[in-house]
Image (cartoon, rainbow, N blue to C red):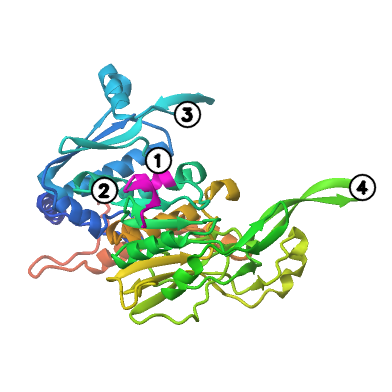
Amino acid sequence: MKRDWTSRTSLLLVGVILVLLNLIGVNLFLRLDLTDDNVYSLSPASIRLVENLEDPVTFKAFFTPNLPAPYSSNLRFLRDKLDDYRAYGGRNVQYEFVDPGSDEALREEAERYGIPPVQIQVIENDNLQIKNAFMGLAILYGGEREIIPVVQDLSTLEYDITSALKKLTRERTPVVGFLTGHGEPTPAQHMPALDRALQRNYDVRTVSVTDTTLSPRPDVLLVVAPSDSLPEAHLKAIDAYLMSGGKAGFLLNRVAANLQMGQASELTTGLEGLLERYGARIGANLVMDRQSSSISVQRNLGGFIVQQAIEYPFFPIATRFNPDHQMVNRLREVGLYYASALDTAAVLPENVTLEPLMYSSPRSGLQQDFFFIQPMVARSMETLRDGPYVLAAAYSGTFPSAYVDGLRSPNTRLVVVGDGDFVNASLMGTEIPGNVAFVLNMVDWLAQDDDLLAIRTKTIEPRQLEFVSEAVRPWIKYANMLGPALLVLLFGLIRWRLRKSRTFVLPGSPAPSAPETPRRAEVHEPA
């Protein structure tokens, strides 16, 4: 019996290669991530953080196993992320998954950590059922802990884990202060989602002026939509804060508008002169944009009062951002509420640079001097084509003092936005995710926490199918159905032809002979 030594040698070689690859993989971590933002790989900031841990960190995931889709992917994605953290952190990173549903002690531990069961919909035996499931993560480090109660948004999972680790390992939590006392909205009441998101990485406080100084002194000051004038002592306090290296974001209204009353007028708070000294100027105008949100109005049609949704140009939707600025280059859209344009032609002080951040669309225009904001002005939107206008800008450098001649600040940063209401949920109806992300990025940039800013801007975006014509669709459909089978047949045909062409005769071996013709038996009759 002839043995196929060639096949056995090939199998042996494949086995040896697999063993070697496994041995190499134990000691060497490699990943090939072909996504645009490397969403399945840790960012350099996360890698640096876990590589420099001084004490061990333990991730304890309270996760119900065998969850149905789409929750099953949450567990797999979390496990992959924790594998990455452990690969770079080495012995300082450990993790475990436990099922609280099977152990009363684990359920009590999850409750003690603040990880509640969540209700999910499950289809079993063609019936829709509601079940409780645990999907939380506790991060334990140095006797302290940070909790992610529900692992739900996979696009922010790395940011959630790394920001929690950063909060556990840093010596001091930076303070973000909201200026109060001049009619500003309060974070907890008017912007709760932004307040909660900021508290994950910062100590959020309200700031007032006491004896010409800010109390407490924040690392980042946010001045959001003051409606009253600021006394000169308060302006001096802000100037002194900036001259000592403070960073600030000014989200200001230059026009006070009331949609219900249909009235608008110029608003002066005293900050205008202060900002002009720093090279920033918000025009006393309103941006009208054809790319805008809709509002509902009542109309009389044939004696009947009906609700009708119309586009309202005074609520522009910004989709153009500076592609070179990390603060905004991954934002998709920001909705605004009676925004004013910035005057970028204002003279900048020496050693101060300006970077536009956000623009209106090219089909936009300005209304100034006399404001007419009645909703039915939308009829004239066809004439809007003077844009784009700058709606937000970043300033950096050494700024001159507005009150002390010759005094300049150290290198610091400012952000100016021509709208103070776009983060106010009571006016916008809700807190738009893009608006909240813009302010979070702004605070990270002002706090010069570029690591967190880089992680947050990583996104997992669904890839939309490109539109194809009706004539092309059947070809794509049948190519997907039959293409793989045809490729397998083609591969088999090519392989058969190659093997046939390799048939040869070894030297010294008998040449293949033609098949013998069967000989007929000869019968001899007796003589």
Residue annotated with mark 1:
152
- Tell us which disc is closer to us: 3 or 1: 1
- Identify which residue, 1 or 58, lies in the foreground: 58
- In this rendering, position of residue 435 left or right of residue 110: right
Cα distance between the residues tagged 3 and 1: 16 Å
- Tell us which disc is closer to us: 2 or 3: 2
For numbered disc 3, what is the local secondary structure? strand
Circle 4: is it few (<14), some (14-19), or many (20+) Cα within 10 Å?
A: few
- Tell whether label 1 touches label 3 (CB within 8 Å): no
Q: Which residues are magenta?
A: 195-212
- In this rendering, position of residue 276 left or right of residue 204: right
At 12% from the left edge and 44% from the top edge, which residue is drawn? 92
Residue annotated with mark 2:
173
- Identify which residue, 368 or 20, lies in the foreground: 368
Q: Position of residue 89 (x, y in %)?
A: 15, 49
Amino acid type, residue under disc 3 in the picture: Val
Residue annotated with mark 4:
303
Is any part of residue 527 visible from this angle?
no
**Precedes in sequence: disc 4 or disc 2:** 2
Amino acid type, residue under disc 1 in the picture: Gln
**Precedes in sequence: disc 3 or disc 1:** 3
Residue annotated with mark 3:
122
